[in-house]
Image (tube, rainbow, N blue to C red):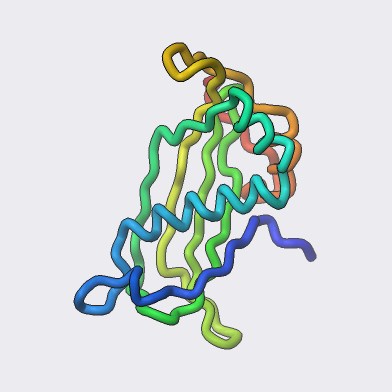
Amino acid sequence: MAEDYFEYRHTVGFEETNLVGNVYYVNYLRWQGRCRELFLQQKAPEVLAEVQDDLKLFTLKVDCEFFAEITAFDELSIRMRLSELGQTQLEFSFDYVKVTGGAELLVARGRQRIACMRGPNTNTVPSRIPEALAHALEPYTAHGRVPTGRAA
């Protein structure tokens, strides 16, 4: 059975920990961004071409809730799902899963709301989510259905 999430695998490095050896919280947000970037590179390269033209993907909101600590050399699976799809905005959910041998432990959960905008930096306006992006996200919807939200 195919998974309903896009996965980014990551090994925690010393540079991502604080003085007591725990992962510094800002890294969780970096990993969200990295997961999103890799998704675009691997599953929606035509959207990356639009980003180089005039499409802007503005992050409006991020959050992360922590359940367990992780340290250097822990193996993580960052799993991204589409949790909401509007006309100009979408929201991703992220599960941070520590993988040890065959065992998995949910260590954190995050969310990220994105707005699609177009135009020059001095005059951007909301834009419909590109069809290629919506199509690429179809397999990664939470609970196997395309979620709809506000007519953002």
Q: How many marks?
A: 0
* Residue 85 placement (x, y as % from top left): 60, 33
Horizontal side of 142 relative to 67 (left or right) equals right
* Residue 126 placement (x, y as % from top left): 53, 17
The residue that appears at 50% across and 34% down in the rendered structure is 114
Horizontal side of 22 relative to 118 (left or right) equals left
* Residue 106 placement (x, y as % from top left): 46, 69
The answer to whether 48 is drawn above or below residue 26 in the figure is above
* Residue 79 placement (x, y as % from top left): 57, 59
Q: Nearer the viewer, residue 56 or 59?
A: 56
The residue that appears at 52% across and 70% down in the rendered structure is 10
The residue that appears at 63% across and 26% down in the rendered structure is 53
Residue found farthest to the right: 1
Residue found farthest to the bottom: 101
Q: Nearer the viewer, residue 109 or 25?
A: 25
* Residue 54, picture quadrant: top right
The answer to whether 80 is drawn above or below residue 121 in the figure is below
* Residue 23, picture quadrant: bottom left
The answer to whether 35 is drawn above or below residue 148 in the figure is below
The residue that appears at 79% across and 65% down in the rendered structure is 1
